[in-house]
Amino acid sequence: MTPIRPTAPPATGPRIRSRGARHGAWRLLNTLARTVAVFVPVFLIATFVTFALRSLSGLSPARIQLGEEATPEAVARVEAQWGLNRPFLTQYGDWIGGILHGRLGTSWTNGADISTLIGLGLGVSLSVAVFALVIGVTAGFALGTVAALRRTTWIDRAVTGFVTLISVMPAFVVGIVLVTVLAVGLHLFPSAGYVPADQGVGPWLAHITLPALALSFDVVADVARQLRGGLVAAYGENYVTGAVVRGLGPRRIFFGHVLRNGLGPALATLGLKFPALVGASVVTEWIFGLQGFGRFANDSAQSGDVPAVQGVLVVSIVLVVSFNLIVNLVLARVTPASQRGV
C-alpha cells in the first residue's frame, strides 16, 4: 500500500505578504508607466500648440519695443535678433530643447529670464494652493465622514446644506469678506502682502491663511460630497455585510473596508482641484496683493509677452500632469477598486 504523502501547507505569512508586496509594486510601476506614456505625447502636442500661438497671434517683440509706427526694416532687424526669421520648426526645436534643460526663454518686455520670473510667482501661488488643499481636504474629509456615518439624519442634511452653500460662493467674494472681518475688523491676519517661508514660518502662514481659506471652500464642498457618496455606497456592499456577520466592530469595518473602498471618488476629485486652485488664484492674488503665478500670467497676456505666456502654459501643463500622476499613484496604492483596475 502506497503511503499517503502529506500535502504542503498553504502559503501563509511572509510568503503571502511578499507576493502581495511584489504585486503592489508592480501595480504602482504599471500606473507610473501608463501615466508617463500619456504624458509624453500630450506634452509634445501641447507645447507645439503653445509655441504656435506666437505665429497665430501676429505679435512681435519689435512691436512691443519699437511701437506700432516702426518701419519694416526696424521690425525685421529686431525679429532677426530674436531669431524669429528662422523656419518655424527650427525655432520650435530650439525652444523645446531649452524647456527640457529648464530654460523657458526671455521676456519680450523687459529681457528678464522667464524661468526666474515664473519661479518667483509660482512659489507664492503654490504656497497658497497647497495650504488651501490641506484645509479643503481636512475639512472636507471630516464633513464627508460625519455625513456618511450619520446618513439620513439631521446631521447629514445639515452637512449637505452647508457644503452646497459654500460651493456656490465665489472665491473673490469670500476673500473680500475675510479681509473685511478678520483682517480689517479683528486685526487677526494681515490684509495683503506675502512673506517667504525662509523669513519665518509664522509670518508666512499669517499671510497665506486668508487667501488659502478663500480658495478652499470649493475643495471642502467637493471632497465632502464625493467622500460621503463613496462611503455610503461602500456601506451598501456585500463585504460590509459579511464583516458584520463575522462580528467585526464598527471601527474596524469603517477603517478596514469602508474607507479604503470609498476614498476613490474623493481622491480623483483632487486631481482636478489642485491645478484649478493655481489657475483660479489670479483674482484672489489681486484681492490680497500677492505677486503670484496667476497675476504674472495675466500681466504677461495683457502686455503681449508671448514667451512669458508660453512659459506659463508649459509650467501649467507640467503641474497638471504631475499632480494627476501623484493622485493616480495614491489611488493605485490605497483603494482596492483602483488596484483591481490596474
Image: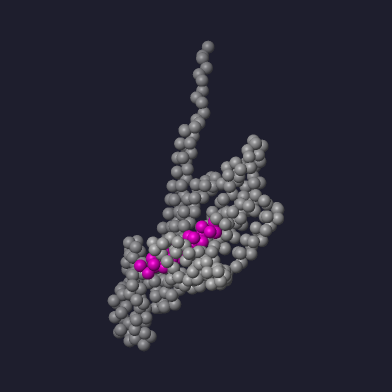
260 relative position to 90: left or right: right
What residue is at 43 percent from the left and 54 percent from the top? Answer: 36
Q: Which residue is more in the foreground, 45 or 150?
A: 150
Look at the image and name its color scheme. one colour
Residue 86 is at least partly visible in this image: yes
154 relative position to 323: left or right: right
Residue 92 is at least partly visible in this image: no
Q: Which residue is more in the foreground, 272 or 285?
A: 285
Q: Is residue 220 above or below residue 77?
A: above
Question: Magenta segment range?
Answer: 116-137
Q: Is residue 104 above or below residue 342?
A: below
What residue is at 29 percent from the left and 80 percent from the top? Answer: 77
What residue is at 48 percent from the left and 60 percent from the top? Answer: 130
Residue 274: % across, % down:
50, 61
Is 136 magenta? The answer is yes
What residue is at 52 percent from the left and 66 percent from the top? Answer: 188
Residue 248: % across, % down:
63, 38
Which is the main secondary structure of the residues drawn in magenta?
A: helix
Q: Is residue 6 above or below residue 268?
A: above
